[in-house]
Amino acid sequence: MTGSAFRSSSRPAPRAIARWLLAVAALVFCMVVVGGITRLTESGLSITQWKPITGAIPPLTHDQWMEAFRLYQQIPEYREINRGMSLGDFQFIFFWEWAHRLLGRLIGIAFALPLAWFAWKRAIPAGYGWRLVALLALGGLQGAIGWWMVKSGLSVRTDVSHYRLAVHLLTALFIIGGLIWTALDLLALTRNRAARPARLRLLAMLALTALFVQLLFGAFTAGLDAGYVSSTWPLMNDYLVPDGISWMGSFWSTLSSDPYLVHFIHRWWAWVVAALLVLLARRARRAGHRGASIAINATVGTQVLLGIATVVSGIALPLAVLHQAVGALVVASAAWGAHAIGRPGA
């Protein structure tokens, strides 16, 4: 791919590129959902090797399945938690991790090949080539982060590091936001050739920063299984501030690693995020973007209700998966709203 492929041409195709980016964002959303199922079913460590090409083909014979099972039996999760697991049970968890990795490969192809095509046709508007390449590189980095996360649970631990899990999830959500933001810039370009990219306004920056913190603690909650420490709402086991917080020497260690405190923060910081996102929705509506306003209000309201329902259900799998899925939709709608108020003239 040469540098000339990123210069403006006589045939730019911003609408086609925008639609392609939104389709890729939908695929990343699906991957976030499958990733949530993988985490909740404790499937993430079932594949103990990283084979970017041949790993796309699952075991096909009994001997191949037994070899994959033998490799899994060597890690601490099997020895300390799942000892005695049947081959059928192993195949179940293997399927979800394999599907998660396969979807990642498909997303890479769905991004790289059309990008090469648009570049070869010189259809990428001026100034957008670097952004598309950055998104491609970020997607490649996400694959490496996924394996880095899995490796943390293969030798000493019985699960993956919740810090690495947080990096993995937040990178995926950032990619969704970046894809949507770039697509919206390109759609504005289809309506007005002189349209400039949107800018991040102060309110949007505050709302997105607060949302980032909430998503971070949501990832910590998942990684630490902190949702299980209380199944009551609004109090946590009859306390506003939960009884059971263990101070671990340093402020950051306690803040990020104590299940009771992590759950408490994730539970109550949500209201700060909701308030800021509602303000963002109102600002988007005043800027003439009613769709973005409706999307933010609908996803935020649904997410709050799902969060409460997930807790009181004792982390029922369908509700927990929906909670992660709608969390991704909150990111998408927040990116839409932030873009709406950041457009020149908004």
Image (tube, grey):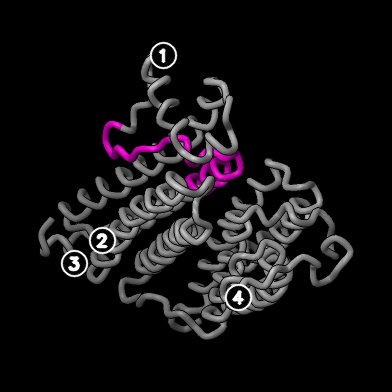
- Viewer-side residue, 323 vs 217: 217
Kindly identify which residue carries mark 3: 8
Q: Earlier in the sequence, mark 4 or mark 2?
A: 2
The label on residue 62 is: 1
The residues colored magenta run: 30-54
Spatial CA distance of label 4 from label 1 is 50 Å
Q: Secondary structure at mark 4?
A: loop
> Of circles 2 and 3, which is in front?
2
Kindly identify which residue carries mark 2: 133
Q: Secondary structure at mark 1?
A: helix
Left or right: residue 52 versus residue 233 is: left
Spatial CA distance of label 2 from label 3 is 16 Å
> Of circles 1 and 2, which is in front?
1
**Residue at the extreme right:** 238
Spatial CA distance of label 4 from label 3 is 56 Å
Instruction: Give the percent coordinates (x, y) of residue 250.
Output: 58, 77
Say above or below: 101 vs 208: above
Instruction: Give the percent coordinates (x, y) of residue 251.
Output: 60, 78
- Viewer-side residue, 153 vs 214: 153
Q: Earlier in the sequence, mark 1 or mark 2?
A: 1
Spatial CA distance of label 1 from label 3 is 55 Å
Quadrant where the N terminus is found in the figure = bottom left
Task: Mark yes or no: residue 180 visible.
Answer: no
Whether 113 is among the magenta residues is no
Q: Please name the residue shown 81% across and 67% down the image.
A: 243
Question: Is there a contact, CB below 8 Å, between mark 2 and mark 3?
Answer: no
- Label 4 neighbourhood size at 10 Å, few (<14), some (14-19), many (20+)? few
Left or right: residue 146 versus residue 134 is: right
Task: Mark yes or no: residue 318 visible.
Answer: yes
Question: Is there a contact, CB below 8 Å, between mark 4 and mark 1?
Answer: no
What residue type is disc 2 on? Val
Kindly identify which residue carries mark 4: 249
